[in-house]
């Protein structure tokens, strides 16, 4: 039972354009959401998070949007850079202090 | 300076053996975790420890036993290894948030790829 779903296994985007990674969740009790980035042979690294009291959080080139009614969040990267090529994991928890449930990940390829 | 380190990075062993994976963090965090990433790429939490105390113990076979000698270390011991144990195991740590059980913005180690033959 996947509570956090990333339905696109991979995504290719031209350098300089916007990358949009999507994530859906089924548990309406989730109220804290995170994105992690993972390079091959390395552990995931925290990227950005958002609490359910917000619908947008921005950090430099990265913006996370949350649509609670649709149980959907997305990560926007603009402009996309070659170093953004990685696997991106969406994650969620029921409160800030509960276990994190990860999605399966989306592999992002930034094309030159 | 490595924040969260794991040893070994690769581990190949036969069914029935007992093996350990070590994890150390130098971030001064209070909470540490073990995750398993299986062949389907799902990253699932196995255990978490807060100040050497077991906080989360997911539905994991009791062949898996975490051991935390101090809050900077969380080792994973696996008895009687099975083929299905083959996976990448990640250790992680986070700063305790206000005395609660688990923080976010976890810092992950590089992973240990375990192959059971």
Image (tube, coloured by chain):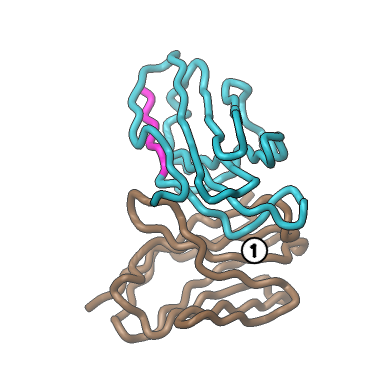
Chain colours: A brown, B cyan
Q: Residues within 10 Å of mark 1 (few under 14, many from 20)?
A: many
Q: Residue at x 51, y 40 (%)?
A: B36
- Closest to the observer, B1 or A101: B1
Q: Which residues are magenta?
A: B111-117
| Quadrant containing the C terminus of chain B in the rendered view | top left
**Does B114 lie within the magenta span?**
yes
Q: Chain of mark 1?
A: A
x and y percentages locating residue B65 in the rendered image: 59, 25
x and y percentages locating residue B112 in the rendered image: 40, 37
Question: Tag 1's secondary structure?
Answer: strand
Instruction: Give the dominant element type of the magenta stretch: helix, strand or loop.
Output: strand
Q: Residue at x 49, y 39 (%)?
A: B24
State left or right for residue A33 relative to residue A47: right
Residue A27 vertical placement versus B75 (above, below): below
Residue at image mark 1: A25
Residue B16 vertical placement versus B107 (above, below): above
**Does A86 lie within the magenta span?**
no
Q: Is residue B61 visible?
A: yes
x and y percentages locating residue A10 in the rendered image: 38, 65
Residue B84 vertical placement versus A45 (above, below): above
- Closest to the observer, B77 or A15: B77
Q: Residue at x 45, y 13 (%)?
A: B16
């Amino acid at each position: 039972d996947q509570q956090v779903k990333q339905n696109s296994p991979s995504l290719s985007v031209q350098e300089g354009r916007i990358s949009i990674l999507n994530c859906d969740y089924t548990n309406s009790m989730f109220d804290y959401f995170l994105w992690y980035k993972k390079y091959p042979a390395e552990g995931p690294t925290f990227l950005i998070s958002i609490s359910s009291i917000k619908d947008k959080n921005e950090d430099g080139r990265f913006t996370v949007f949350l649509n609670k009614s649709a149980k959907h969040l997305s990560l926007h990267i603009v402009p996309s850079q070659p170093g953004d090529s990685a696997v991106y994991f969406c994650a969620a928890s029921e409160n800030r202090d509960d276990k994190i449930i990860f999605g399966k990940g989306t592999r992002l390829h930034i094309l030159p | 300076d490595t924040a969260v380190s794991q040893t070994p990075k690769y581990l190949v062993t036969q069914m029935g053996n007992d093996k350990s994976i070590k994890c150390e963090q130098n971030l001064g965090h209070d909470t540490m975790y073990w995750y398993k990433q299986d062949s389907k790429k799902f990253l699932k939490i196995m255990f978490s420890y807060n100040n050497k105390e077991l906080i989360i113990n997911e539905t994991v076979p009791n062949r898996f036993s975490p051991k935390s000698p101090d809050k900077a270390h969380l080792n994973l011991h696996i008895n009687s290894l099975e083929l299905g144990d083959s996976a990448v195991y990640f250790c992680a740590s986070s700063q305790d948030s206000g005395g609660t059980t688990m923080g976010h913005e976890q810092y992950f180690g590089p992973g240990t790829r375990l192959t059971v033959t």
